[in-house]
Image (cartoon, rainbow, N blue to C red):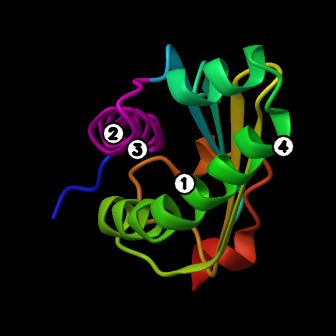
Amino acid sequence: MSYPTIGQLEREIAQRISALYSEQLGQRPVQVVCHFFDTELVISLEKAATQVEVTLISGGYENLAEQVRLFLDKIIKPQLQDLIEEVIGKPILDLMTNTNLATGRTGIIVVLQQIPEVRNPESIPKANLKNLAE
């Protein structure tokens, strides 16, 4: 069985998250950056705020926009977890998201039990040899 490279996994996760945001929120982020660091995965999305959130903020309803984002994140979080687990073939221990509506950026931190099986595990920054052996 041929495993993907870490770069291939990062690209697939980024592409699928972009498609998920487009499908579920009607807003495709301009850029999705995804990087593994040992047993953590860090993802950033540029221009992830929806038009509704932007309109609420520009109309002076920042608190309502924040509430809308909290509910959207709550709805999309299990979908993100399923998507990432499907791509990497490993369970997720924790997934945290936060969106700064002033900048439109979303940050996602994913904590894994172990790194995914890839052809080039040495390419994962800070990869712990103990995690590679498990």
Q: Which residue is under mark 2?
A: 12
Q: Do callouts 4 and 2 mark residues in contact (Cβ within 8 Å)?
A: no
- Identify which amino acid the numbered label 2 is placed on: Glu
Q: Which residue is under mark 3?
A: 13
Residue 68 higher or lower than 96, as above or below: above
Instruction: Tell me which label, 1 or 4, sits earlier in the chain.
Output: 4
The span shown in magenta is 6-28
Q: Which residue is under mark 4?
A: 63
- Identify which amino acid the numbered label 4 is placed on: Asn
At which x and y percent is residue 73?
Answer: 59, 56
* Side (left or right) of 21 relative to 75: left
How far, Cα to Cα, is label 4 from label 3? 31 Å
- Identify which amino acid the numbered label 1 is placed on: Leu
- The residue closer to the viewer here, 126 or 46, is 46
At which x and y percent is residue 44?
Answer: 66, 33
Q: Which residue is under mark 1?
A: 72
How far, Cα to Cα, is label 3 from label 2? 4 Å
Tag nearer the camera, 4 or 3: 4
Tag nearer the camera, 3 or 1: 1
Magenta stretch prevailing secondary structure:
helix
How far, Cα to Cα, is label 1 from label 2? 23 Å
Tag nearer the camera, 1 or 2: 1
Element class at badge 2: helix
Element class at badge 3: helix
Instruction: Tell me which label, 4 or 3, sits earlier in the chain.
Output: 3
Report which quarter residue 106 is drawn in: top right
Quadrant where the N terminus sits is bottom left
